[in-house]
């Protein structure tokens, strides 16, 4: 049972409103409570009535950091093309100035945390598909569950304005009570049935891969990642809560995320970390090069060995290592990575994987690291700018948030971003799923097509299309 001191809250809200009146502008009030363990999926589900369309979910592969947000206290959004990472960071810092934060704990990911992300390429011509997501979009939740290394916390964030009075306190009490009383409600949603699967221009996609292979052979581009889309139509509204809960069970070794905005939901299970920062410690991942899982243990092992020794995949992977190492060396005094890739095996696919760790310079922020790394050649290509331009020209897809940084930053500047692959955008009765692959001079278009097929599977299974 959760018991949170009411009188304390009343005093704190009073102080925050007083400060807002003195300053003549809104002030953030935030308090953190340590609470008993709550199932994070139940917490997400219980926001369905009051906070539908204003929720997010995040879990890292090791279950070390789980964050679930309900409601929006503050939104940071823009379609700015240049300096977009810097712009978001500046707005976040400005917003936090003069805030009242009651947080006696030292863990990361508690207190004010903004969750969200960026589009893959803000210069790409927009379609209607991603109209509900700005190119940079972050939410500070009203209520947030954080499970950090096994300890559970509840953060409450309220923006107090000079016009607020006692009724604000009553509203917070009412909302918090509603969350906790509805935690154990059963969520009996009926499952929508898939009625149609549209593969978007598959022949064109294969042709584009063939043409890009020719370009790559001629140089100077070395690698270009090309992606495609599946559009699914259902006979009823797709229940994001159910899809999330399937991903949570079926892809537990991945980053599991869901981000609602204006009625749509971007959701997925990505195996790929872009960057995590805790103090001066930085962690990144090179993930590129793929092969299917085997039907038997023996076959799986043989396939893994084959991947570890396959020249095309080693080259595809090597470009990612080269770029991430270089990008981190700019921001870190020490960068450590193994000489050879290892295997990452997830449910439907195995990848070449090289973890990277570093110690960054004092003035390096998480969003600066995101800017330097995005897009890595696992999502864009090499050289970075030429590859992104090529994608912009030849790809028949509005990537939106797919293959882009998605994650969170806390008020101390710590946080983590994944690369949002193995993902889909849910829009009422319809959904788009996305999958891409690293094209190099040695690529065979048909094999790349099959590889993207494997990468659709986690989302297809979770959404009920398999
Ligand atoms: C672009 C995707 O995967 C990337 C990550 C791992 C392996 C990849 C590959 O082998 O092509 C891709 O670079 C995707 O899943 O949509
Ligand atoms: Mg590949």
Image: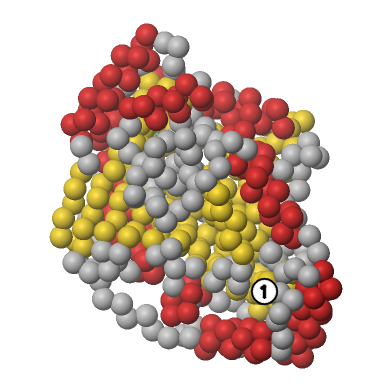
For residue 138, above or below residue 1:
above
Q: How crowded is mark 1: few (under 14 residues within 10 Å), some or many (20 or more)?
A: many
Which of 438/82 is in front? 82
Residue 237 shows up from this direction? yes
Query: 205 above or below 254?
Result: above
The image quadrant where one finds the C terminus is bottom left
Q: Could you say where residue 309 lies in the image, as x and y percent from the top left?
A: 41, 23
Is residue 343 at least partly visible in the picture?
no
For residue 211, which quarter of the picture?
Answer: top left
Q: In this view, does 413 lie above or below 386?
A: below
Q: What is the x, y in percent for residue 13?
A: 75, 81
- Residue at the far left: name it: 195
Q: Position of residue 396 (x, y in %)?
A: 30, 35
- The yes-or-no answer for disc 1 within 8 Å of ligand 1 is no
Q: Which residue is drawn at 42% across and 56% down?
A: 132
Look at mark 1 in the image and give the residue it sits on. 158
Q: In this view, does 146 lie to the left or right of 261?
A: right
Residue in the foreground of this view, choosing between 409 and 60: 409
| Residue 408 horizontal side relative to residue 209, left or right | right
Q: Which residue is drawn at 21% across and 58% down?
A: 233
- Describe the element under mark 1 as helix, strand or loop: strand
Taking the spot 53% from the left edge, 83% from the top edge, the residue there is: 179
């Amino acid at each position: 049972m959760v018991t949170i001191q009411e009188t304390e809250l009343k005093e704190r809200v009073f102080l925050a409103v007083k400060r807002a009146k003195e300053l003549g502008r809104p002030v953030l009030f935030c308090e953190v409570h340590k609470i008993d363990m709550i199932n994070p999926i139940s917490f997400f589900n219980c926001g369905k009535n009051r906070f539908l369309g204003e929720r997010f979910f995040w879990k890292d592969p090791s279950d070390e950091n789980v964050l679930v947000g309900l409601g929006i206290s503050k939104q940071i959004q823009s379609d700015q093309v240049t300096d977009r990472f810097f712009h978001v960071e500046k707005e976040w810092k400005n917003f936090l100035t003069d805030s009242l934060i009651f947080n006696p704990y030292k863990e990361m990911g508690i207190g004010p945390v903004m969750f969200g992300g960026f589009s893959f390429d803000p210069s790409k011509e927009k379609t209607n598909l991603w109209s509900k997501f700005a190119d940079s979009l972050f939410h500070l939740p009203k209520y947030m569950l954080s499970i950090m290394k096994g300890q559970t916390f509840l953060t409450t964030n309220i923006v107090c304005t000079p016009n607020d009075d006692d009724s604000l306190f009553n509203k917070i009490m009412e909302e918090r009570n509603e969350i906790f009383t509805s935690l154990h409600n059963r969520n009996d949603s009926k499952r929508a049935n898939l009625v149609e699967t549209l593969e978007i221009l598959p022949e064109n996609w294969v042709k584009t891969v063939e043409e890009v292979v020719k370009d790559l052979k001629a140089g100077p581009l070395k690698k270009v990642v090309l992606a495609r889309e599946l559009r699914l139509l259902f006979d009823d509204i797709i229940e994001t809560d159910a899809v999330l809960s399937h991903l949570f069970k079926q892809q537990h070794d991945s980053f599991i995320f869901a981000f609602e905005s204006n009625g749509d939901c971007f959701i997925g299970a990505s195996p790929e970390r872009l960057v995590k920062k805790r103090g001066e410690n930085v962690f990144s991942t090179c993930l590129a090069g793929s092969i299917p899982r085997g039907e038997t243990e023996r076959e799986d092992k043989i396939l893994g060995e084959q991947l570890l020794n396959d020249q095309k995949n080693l080259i595809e992977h090597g470009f990612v290592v080269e770029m991430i190492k270089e990008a981190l060396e700019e921001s870190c005094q020490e960068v450590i990575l193994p000489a050879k890739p290892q295997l990452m095996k997830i449910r439907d696919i195995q990848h070449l994987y090289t973890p990277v760790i570093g110690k960054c310079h004092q003035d390096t922020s998480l969003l600066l690291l995101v800017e330097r790394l995005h897009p890595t050649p696992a999502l864009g290509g090499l050289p970075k700018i030429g590859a992104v331009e090529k994608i912009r020209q030849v790809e028949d897809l509005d990537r939106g948030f797919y293959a882009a940084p998605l994650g969170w930053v806390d008020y101390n500047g710590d946080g983590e971003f994944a690369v949002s692959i193995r993902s889909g955008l849910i829009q009422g009765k319809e959904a788009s799923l996305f999958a891409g692959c690293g094209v190099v001079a040695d690529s065979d278009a048909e094999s790349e097509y099959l590889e993207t097929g494997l990468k659709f599977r986690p989302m297809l299974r979770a959404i009920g299309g398999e």
